[in-house]
Amino acid sequence: MDLIVSQILTGLSIASILMLIALGLAIIYGVTGVINLAHGEVVMLGAYCAWVLQTQFGLSLLVSLVPIFALLFVFGWIIEAVIIRHLYDRPLDTILATWGIGVMAQQAVRLLAGGELRYVEMPPSLSSSITIFGATESSYRLFVLVVAVGLFALTWYIYRKTSFGLKLRAITQNRSVASSFGVNSARIYRQTFAFGAGVAGLAGALVSPLKSVSPEMGTSYVVDAFMVVVLGGVQSLFGTMASSAILGELSGLLAFFSNDTIAKALVLLLIVVLIRFRPQGLFVTRVRS
Amino acid sequence: MKRNRRQFLQGGAALGAFAVAGFPHIWSKNADLAWAANGEIKVGVLFSLTGTTAIIEESLNKAAIMAIDEINAAGGINGRKLVAVIEDPASDPATFAEKARKLVLSDKCVSVFGSFTSASRKAVLPVFEKQKSLYWYPTLYEGRECSKNVIYGGAVPNQQQDDFIPWLVNKFGKRWYLIGSNYIYPKEENNYCKKLLKTLGAEVVAEEYVPLGHSEFSSVINKLKAEKPNVIFSTVVGDSVVALHRQYHAAGLDPANMPMASLTTSENEVAAMGGAAAAGHFTSAPYFMVWDSPENQKFVEAYKSRWGGDKVTQFVSEATYFQVHLFKQAVAKLAASDISPESIREAVKGEQYKAPQGLVKVEPENLHCWLRPKIGQCQPDGQFKILKQSADWLEPDPYKAYPNQKCTASGLKTI
């Protein structure tokens, strides 16, 4: 029994990390259609912000979450205003531009902070483990799960229940018609991009006590994030949640019964097969075309 | 048109003939002193300064430069200064090969100090064997190599495990869980480990490999909780070491009854995972930063004052350092006109040097080093406490796991 609970919790933990990272990308890709290859580097920057705030200013991780969101929000704002906004109708150019931003960010971090692995301390209040139904789980992982669900709920609320979200949905359906209704689409795009970047930065900060902080940590995350978003269906927030849950549980289970190398390969295979038969992903937003 | 082409071809052929004849090199008076011309001896330094393995390789670069500067400050080698030609192969084996070729062919380095990963060493090996140059490889590796063009300064499996495994079996028990990154180094180490465990009557409950750079270990932790081994023999490398230790600690597992025993967890990784996650686990290596010897004190002080008080030294940067000094000792024995990669190789056979870890020696048969392995347990402050040290130096045998093969001075022999 405790093994089953353990497995479920493990899967949920992996899924929550996946979802945190993919949420920012889902927002940006889903709304603006920008393929942001610098997403992994934004996650990495969030982790480095956590490290800097901890070593230079002595802020514990929990306290620094809000400043990190704000910092990466501003970063996303600037990137969008300077580079991305010129490239909305040119998808290939956005790929190139965001890839370039990613490479520059990685090297800048390496020049400024050095290439060594950095240490972000886990908050002492969350360093113990909790026993649920006989299975022990790290309380920090449960905290990350709670934060992931909370962020998702917040995003969903903004998307569905606020006037900002309404404008967002209008722009997603048809940008020019929405503009003709007086919606400032440029500003909304910028705010969306910044919000997506902020969420990605939070993800990086939250993941850093479980792993390590290095300039190349983002590269693997962007691949996982895209897989989650594409599998879940673009423009569907619930799709992101569902696909991260499925992928997380599946990797956990497969890794337990065989090993992580096989698990990774099988999960990728599954995604390829699923996309082959359902290219639009799991959840489709029905659009009258 | 026809005439122009004929003239062009004739001119080209003449030029080609000149170049092949070696003009003007063959007429240069300094041809004999090609390796030590202008009072300088050029050596290559080939460690990644960018890319994934730069994390550790830049410390090797720093150790090499520091050793070279020390030698020059003491007057060089018989009055000739060492000139370091530094290249950055960016953690990519193909770039390693390209830069190695450049260092040997166009920069005319008489030796090159380089490489951390086995992949990069395998990539540059053909260059050094074909050009009959000399490569000084400081990193611990999986053995099973017998090149006449490489001086190996790192430990091979028998040196790291012959003391370590029996000690752990005695202290903790016979159920072992082997986990490593998915490439040749962990696989060979596990191969050797399994052979040793068999002779000790111990049992391998599981052997698994995770992708390189993998950082999600929750399934592995679940398996550990289910199997409850006595010892976890970990050969994961890089980011994975840090992630595994941190998640092990976060899951509440206890190193007092299920310790992780590693060959690769050094002071660098410990700094990145924090003392709390590192404490209680064991590493076997020829060198630890806390090792108490006058040579080590000098080495650590010099390293910290040159590169920063927060820097750490570990077993690979120490090996890089002593290899440069072994090089100096070998070259010092030669006359200036005799300096060449082959003569340096012959001169360094049997050379001894008082390295920070203790006295080391280059084994003439297989060009590996006699080293002094130690067993350290990590403490909460991030340094190691040395629990056991080898009584004397240990002979390197890169083919010990393959009893029908032996590396000798005349090549790999099948017995």
Image: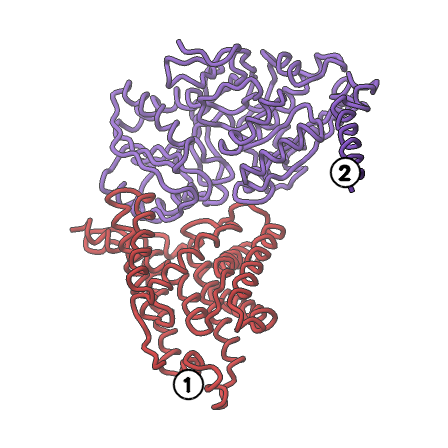
Chain colours: A red, B purple
Q: Chain of mark 2?
A: B
Residue A163, numbered circle:
1
Specify whether B220 is left or right of B114: left
Residue B336 position, x and y percent, is 76, 15
> Is residue A129 visible to the viewer in this orientation of the structure?
no
Three-letter amino acid code of the residue under disc 2: Arg
Q: Which residue is mark 2?
A: B5
Q: Residue at x 29, y 29 (%)?
A: B172
Identify the secondary structure beneath mark 2. Answer: helix
Toward the left, the furthest residue is A1
Rendering coords of residue B366 (x, y %): 51, 15
Residue B71 showing in the rendered view: yes
Q: Residue at x 74, y 20 (%)?
A: B77
From the viewer's side, name the closer residue of B385 and B92: B92
Circle 2 Cα neighbour tier, 10 Å, few/some/many (<14 / 14–19 / ≥20): few
Residue at mark 1 to residue at mark 2: CA–CA distance = 77 Å
Q: Residue at x 32, y 58 (%)?
A: A15
> How many neighbours does mark 1 have within 10 angstroms: few (below 14), some (14-19), or many (20 or more)?
few
The residue at 51%/25% (across/down) is: B154
Q: Are marks 1 and 2 in contact (CB under 8 Å)?
A: no
SS at badge 1: helix
Front residue (pair B383, A91): A91
Q: What subunit carries mark 1?
A: A
Image vertical order of residue B162 relative to residue B3, above or below: above
Is A28 drawn above or below residue B90 in the view shown? below
